[in-house]
Image (tube, grey):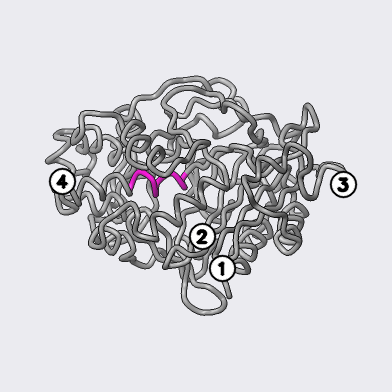
Amino acid sequence: MRIELTTRAVATTLVTALAGIGLTLPAAGATGPATGTARGAAHGASHSRALQAHVDTVMKTGTVAVVARSTGPEGSRYATAGVADRATGDAARPGDRFRIASAGKTFVATVVLQLVGEGRLSLDDTVEHWLPGTVTGHGNDGSTITVRQLLQHTSGLFNYTADFPEVADKAGYQADRYTTWTPEELVAIAMRHEPGFEPGTGWSYSNTNYILAGMIIKKVTGHDWTREVTQRVIRPLGLRDTLAPSTRPWIPGRHLHGYSAFGEAGTPIDVTAFNPSAAGAAGAMISTTGDLTRFYQALLGGRLLRPAELAAMKTTVRAPELDPGWPGARYGLGLMRIPLSCGGAYYGHGGNLPGYTTRDGVSADGRRAVALDATGDGSSDSSTQQAQNDLIDDELCP
């Protein structure tokens, strides 16, 4: 399994690079605004024709389903297209859950920064201080890597998902989809490789960083990162459809099924069932577009972090590795900063798992937020990514 953030042009998501396999679009009757009980799942949002037009554009690039929500001072709007489950033909609904993959990194970084604000750890603490003997061998040295560098992807540590066979192909996925992994086992994979650069001298997306961040949360609090995220973020914000699972491979309740061909010829397979321990603190979470917009608005609106910690989270460095998906991207502490076509920038964090693509964005003041999820592999070129970028840009630009 590889955790990525973009389409196959960028090696930074929770999935193998997407091959050029076009997906069959669902019948026209399955697209468009949700009806009946689906309207109730919109939680007070109204259907938006403008947002629907963007969702339909994403669908045309080869996705199975798309759900999107946009929230601002004028209220909330939603749009959906495609089917949640190819086997039943059920239409995607605005309140459907999905795997958010690396978008969960913002939740984890928020907890770490809350602990910093409480004086229980420092961003300048070393990994070795909290996890002695964990980062060592093949040139790796935890005494030279700080917590800040973990959250910012400037540690230089090898990305364990680049040497993780679970989703390298259909056979590997089917063999290991229910396997339980410990964080120590995942970090050990990275320790078989030399670092890419000296800590603090470069930028490279590595899921190993957030596995370690989750381990540090447990060392500081005595509780697993899933409990801390739930107690500190999910429950206080009333995110009823957001989960931080540990090993449960199924998505409870109404949800979107994921489909992926893993870059191989042939029909994509249903990849919904997946033991999230393989992703851990780097990308195991489940949510909805409604909950994601609420979370990001609360975060950027100053409801989760003190001013000093929020400022640290928003302090970014250039992330040229992300340019193929987001030209001009910068990265803070669990937050991406992306330029807007109308000037300024928005914050958020994309994420992919096999069969799932999450994109989101929030204005710097937290007043406007948008989130979407697409299922299926999408296009083999940049068209799916571009259509998703255009949707977010259009919603956040005045």
Alpha-carbon span between mark 1 and mark 3: 29 Å
Q: Residue at x 47, y 71 (%)?
A: 345
The residue at which mark 4 appears reads as 121
Q: Position of residue 158 (x, y in %)?
A: 34, 45
Where disc 1 sits, the SS reads helix
- Are discs 3 and 2 less than 8 Å apart at CB? no
Looking at the image, residue 34 sits to the left or right of residue 117; the answer is: right
Q: Mark 4: which amino acid?
A: Leu
Task: Please provide the residue range marked out in magenta.
Answer: 102-109
Alpha-carbon span between mark 1 and mark 2: 8 Å
- Which disc, if any, is residue 361? 2
- Which disc, if any, is residue 199? none
Q: Mark 1: which amino acid?
A: Leu
Mark 2 residue crowding within 10 angstroms, few (<14) / some (14–19) / many (20+): many
- Are discs 1 and 2 less than 8 Å apart at CB? yes
Alpha-carbon span between mark 4 and mark 1: 35 Å
- Which disc, if any, is residue 28? 3
Looking at the image, residue 394 sits to the left or right of residue 351; the answer is: right
Q: Position of residue 105 (x, y in %)?
A: 40, 46
Q: Is residue 231 above or below residue 51?
A: above
Q: How many marks?
A: 4
Where disc 3 sits, the SS reads helix
Instruction: Write down the quadrant of residue 213 in the picture.
Output: top left
Q: Nearer the viewer, mark 1 or mark 3?
A: 1
The residue at which mark 1 appears reads as 396
Magenta: predominant secondary structure element?
Answer: helix
Q: Counting residues from the N terminus, which is met first, the one under dot 1 or under dot 3?
A: 3
- Are discs 3 and 4 less than 8 Å apart at CB? no
Q: Position of residue 96 (x, y in %)?
A: 63, 38
The C terminus lies in quadrant = bottom right
Q: Counting residues from the N terminus, which is met first, the one under dot 3 or under dot 2?
A: 3
Q: Is residue 325 magenta?
A: no
